[in-house]
Image (spheres, helix red, strand yellow):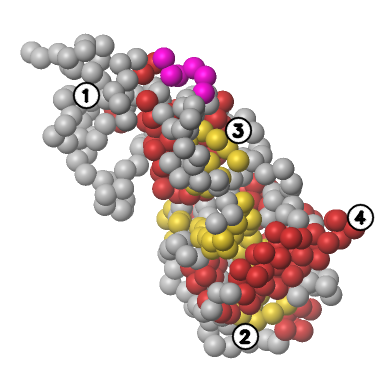
Amino acid sequence: MDFDPFPESRVVGTARVPGAPQRTAPPVPVKIIVAGGFGVGKTTTVGAISEISPLTTEAEMTMESVGVDDPGQATAKTTTTIAMDFGCVTIDQTLKLYLFGTPGQSRFAFMWDDLVRGALGALVVVDTSRIDDCYPAVDYFERAGLPFVVGINTFNGQAGYNLDEVRWALAVRDDVPVLQFDARFRGSVRDALLVVLDQALDKAMRMRSS
Amino acid sequence: MTFPADPDDPDHPAATGVRPFLRATGPGVRYEPAPAPPPGPAPGEPPGEHTTSLRPFVITSGRVAAVDPAIGLETQVSAHPGALSARLSPEQRAIVHLCGEPLSVAEISARLRLHFGVTRILVGDLRAAGHLDVHVLENDFPDPETIMRVIRGLRSIS
């Protein structure tokens, strides 16, 4: 760029240069939310399918959140996601899918309105040994009218309970799919997301016909 | 006794828009803030990452609410050519610098380690000043055709 002796002269008004080459049009972004309790594998889910390694704004767990963010007995995790981590999948040059992992704790619920606006749907990740962790997420998506799918993360190789038992415990509506997946494997995460998209497509069709 | 260079002195132009207390310590720095900051990143901070210790409300000039709630996490932002020659705050300059190619607000926030709320306010400011294009979508919920394209795209992932 040429040296501009009067940089201030450009402060006011648009800085667009007439005749400048057309820049690449931005892709249309769509997003799916990956929600769930603390340490259930949200970041693993996002990382399994994202083409970038998940960008994270993680802060270390502070003293006052010890006990509130109980990671359970099985995990040695010492930090909690107090913001969110996300990744993306480029569908084509004009369409990009973003995945946002969001903490399930109800005290972070204030963040969710921004997250849910415009979202296609949500995958609620569940660890059956700490099933109550996902209650806030399920409650929130039901109230928000966002299509969601309950995905039981079988990262220990077994779900522990069958799907009907989990459905009963969560008391979700019959049209909410409950499925098993493994957050570590891309194909498994992809299939779970496809079920979310199926729900989103149903909603979009209903919105169009009404 | 030496005085710091006058920022208006043409022989010693100040680095544009960089406040003295935000400057990194290094060979290119002419003077240091009175209480010298600890050299290098603070413990617990990943090396090589620059984080400001400014409170968020300082960066946003006290504002806490975004101008436009339609600017979401995934909203794409691209800089106008020439925006870098404007006088901007360091944070705004960093945003413009990142957005040569379209980028989501969430990515800007993550890469600059700025809180999303702060990033959104700064992006809104930059748009109002004509330095950024913010591509806000018209529809709140994607149409079936878009969703079908996502489904087809995901299915092709192996």
- Do discs 3 and 1 share a chain? yes
SS for dot 2: loop
Where does the N terminus of chain A fall, quadrant-wise?
top left
Write the start and end of the magenta stretch as one range. Answer: A9-14
Q: Amino acid at mark 2?
A: Ala
Q: Which residue is mark 2?
A: A159
Where does the C terminus of chain A fall, quadrant-wise?
bottom right
SS for dot 1: loop
Q: Residues within 10 Å of mark 1 (few under 14, many from 20)?
A: few
Q: Which residue is mark 3?
A: B66
Q: Relative to the observer, which residue lies in front, B98 or A66?
A: B98
Can see residue B89? no
Viewer-nearest of discs 3 and 4: 4
Q: Amino acid at mark 4?
A: Ser
Viewer-nearest of discs 4 and 2: 4
Q: Residues within 10 Å of mark 4 (few under 14, many from 20)?
A: few
- Residue A47 in picture, x, y percent from top left: 48, 68
SS for dot 4: loop
- Residue A66 in picture, x, y percent from top left: 49, 59
Q: Hey, which quadrant is residue B5 in on the image? A: top left
